[in-house]
Image: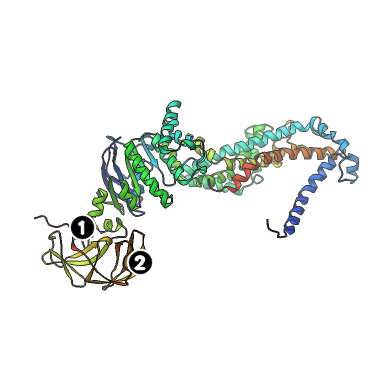
Amino acid sequence: MATLVIENLRKSFGPVAVLHGVDLALASGEMLVIVGASGCGKSTLLRLVAGLDAPTSGRIVLDGRDVARLDPSARDIAMVFQNYALYPHMSVFDNMAYGLRIRGLAKPDIERRVHEAADILGLRPLLTRKPRQLSGGQRQRVAMGRAIVREPKLFLFDEPLSNLDATLRVQMRAEIRRLQRRMGVTSLYVTHDQVEAMTLGDRLLVLHQGVPVQLATPMEVFGRPANTYVAGFIGAPAMNFLPATLASQGTAARFADGTIQRFADGRRAGADGHKLTIGIRPEHVEFEPGGQNFQVDLVEPLGSETVLIGRLASGQLISVKVAGAGPRDETLMVSFPASAFHVFDGTTGLRIDPVVN
Amino acid sequence: MSGRADWPAHTVLALGVLLFLVPVWLLLAGSTLDPAAISRGELSMVPDLRNLGVYGTVLTEGAPGVGPVWRMMLVSAGMALAIAFGKIAISILSAYAVTFFRFPLRMVAFWIIFITLMLPVEVRIIPTYSVMSDLHLINTFPGLTIPLIASATATLLFRQTFLAIPDELVEAARMDGAGPWRFLKDILIPVSAANLAALFVILFVYGWNQYLWPLLVATDPSLDTIVIGIVKMIGTETQTEWNKVMAAAVLALLPPILVVVLMQRWFVKGLTEGDK
């Protein structure tokens, strides 16, 4: 159990800057999920913490000790890789025991630790098998076991579930969360999957093009996204964005079709006519006679809910999520309740919160 | 299987087998015949089983012009093993260096190794001989084997094998705390074991069949390899005892066959199993 503090961590590959200064502080036992599209630098961040790459500048302080220049083996960190990276010629037991043998642990200690981890992960009957004789889920468990037996200060997970099929992924997701809570090891978890991000993390870090965009609890990221990128990235289907301008001394938004809607939560700073982007989640769009015309192009039934994708009269593409089977009409009337608005600056994309009086 | 007629394929295969087996059969049969008859050109396809004793004679006493065959086979085996193991050891290390380490002139080193592929033994045989002579290694076992040990081919093969090893495996080992030697010993060599076995077979046969270099560097009869010995048996001054030559040739075939058969399972795996 340890705290992790990252200060102004930067990484460039030659002239290409991949990480533009990341600051983080993890409490002991906390699980932080780093999420972002591919190429956002999330794997690089993880590799820097692991010591597999050297940072260009910045500090990585694990349990009060700056480890940024140390060899990976000296950092007391264990990592679970995306493709598991099991040693193909070693049995499950040896895969888990290898790191301990190198550290010179006594044989009985190694056996005890491996057997404990195997019991936690349900790997007892498989200890003598080779990785190729295991299923994807079992290999995943062995990879976790290899990390657990080390009893490290920090766990790193590099998209560990992305090679599994959907059912197994859901199952392993819950298992990882349970395990991490039970062991109480501080963890960094990298993923591009927003469901994993929402469900696994105590907190979320959204990275966009090497810049940390938002660091908050999953519900806060979902409820108050810091900018349009986060808003569009977290939540499925993605949030709808409607162009608008500030109106009525900052108390309302004027949409492209001329309608004006008062903000439910108060006045925004800025001059009237300032460009805005109004975000509204698909599940918050309401059907209302007398609303805007919504021409349905595509219906995606998901069982318990249905996603309708179509166009407004202005030609704007939006999606609407409704519970159950959803209406069958091809043209519907929809409205956007002001209480569900997310207000962003139309140019910078940053969230604009109401002015506090 | 379907009832499709596959006799054309079988015919071609049978012909191929025959093509390879007939000369070997001729050897086997000829080794048991009367040398005078062979000299007259009366080579029979039917072996004379009463004369199988020629193998014992050749093994222990040899033939005119050379010592006993067991000794020459021992020299050959020693040379083939030294070359095979030497090549593998050197190539693994050099491939390990150019694949996993970043050092100045790494690619230059690799390309220099690669270029030597274009220079077969025959091309560099005179300078090599001169170097061996300066080192006083003529007519010694090291002189017989060391120049044949450097190998660009094996280095290249190992490099390809190593490149196919996923980065994550290397990184997992680093996180586990394995240093370079440990990684080589515990991960890299076991993971490449199949390729290693395949290469061993190829290199053993290569070493066993060496002719030109042993001919030049080892004139001492105690360093005669079996290949050299067979040539020496075909004397010019004395009457050649062809049955003994053939018996020696049959015996010379055995060790490579043995190696191939014993290593076959690994050999095929190493050649076909691309990724591990």
Amino acid type assigned to the residue bearing label 2 in the image: Val
Q: Are marks 1 and 2 on the same chain?
A: yes
Q: Which residue is mark 1?
A: A351
Q: CA distance from mark 1 to mark 2?
A: 31 Å
Q: How is the image coloured?
A: rainbow
How many numbered marks have been drawn onto this rendered protein structure? 2
Q: A357 or B185: which is nearer to us?
A: A357
* Residue lying at the far left of the rendered structure: A357
Taking the spot 80% from the left edge, 30% from the top edge, the residue there is: B60
Labels 1 & 2 near each other (Cβ < 8 A) = no
Quarter of the image holding residue B148? Answer: top right
Residue A102 horizontal side relative to residue B145, left or right: left
Answer with the quarter of the image where residue B27 lies: top right
Residue B33 x %, y %: 88, 40
B250 horizontally vs A142: left or right: right
Q: Residue A128: give x, y in percent of width and height.
A: 51, 36
* Foreground residue among B63 and B126: B63
Secondary structure category for the residue under label 2? strand
Q: Position of residue A160 (x, y in %)?
A: 40, 46
Which residue corresponds to mark 2? A299
Binning the other alpha carbons within 10 Å of mark 1 as few (below 14), some (14 to 19) or many (20 upward) gives many
Callout 1: SS: loop
Instruction: Give the quarter of the image for residue A63.
Output: top left
